[in-house]
Amino acid sequence: MDNSFYKGYSMSPAMRLLQHNNKESAYTSKKTPWQLVYVERCGNKMEALKREKAVKKYSHAQIEILMRSAKNVVHLFLSEGEKNKNE
């Protein structure tokens, strides 16, 4: 694991995570396994894509702050085993 973060928009974060870990994306295939650490809800697709663009510019430290923020609803997408692993 190289401590990098993949940032992207998805209507189904859990499914997208599976796709990345199944090496269905050339860009992310060499850095598996990926772990879902942050999910933020947006009002609509346009808002989400604008937010994605902004988050892609964040530093590692800023991402870690987001991970601890109230905006993070990742727990809604994790199984019990994954929740315990992330704590």
Image (cartoon, rainbow, N blue to C red):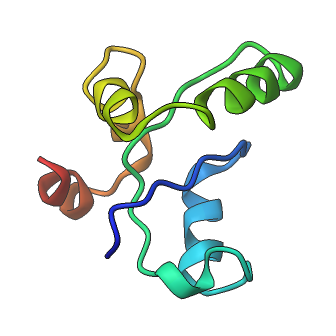
Relative to 19, say whether 51 is above or below.
above
At a point 59% along the width and 30% down the height, the residue shown is 55
Relative to 44, say whether 22 is above or below.
below
Number of numbered discs present? 0
| Camera-nearest residue between 31 and 74 | 31
Quarter occupied by the N terminus = bottom left
Which quadrant of the figure has residue 14? Answer: bottom right
| Camera-nearest residue between 1 and 48 | 1
At a point 30% along the width and 34% down the height, the residue shown is 64
Which quadrant of the figure has residue 60? Answer: top left
Drawn side of residue 2 relative to residue 47, left or right: left
Give residue 15's position: percent from left, percent from top. 63, 63
At a point 63% along the width and 37% down the height, the residue shown is 56
Drawn side of residue 33 relative to residue 49, left or right: left
| Camera-nearest residue between 64 and 17 | 64
Drawn side of residue 45 relative to residue 24, left or right: right
Give residue 43's position: percent from left, percent from top. 74, 13
| Camera-nearest residue between 36 and 29 | 29
Which quadrant of the figure has residue 47? Answer: top right
Relative to 83, say whether 81 is above or below.
below
Give residue 63's position: percent from left, percent from top. 39, 34
At a point 11% along the width and 47% down the height, the residue shown is 87
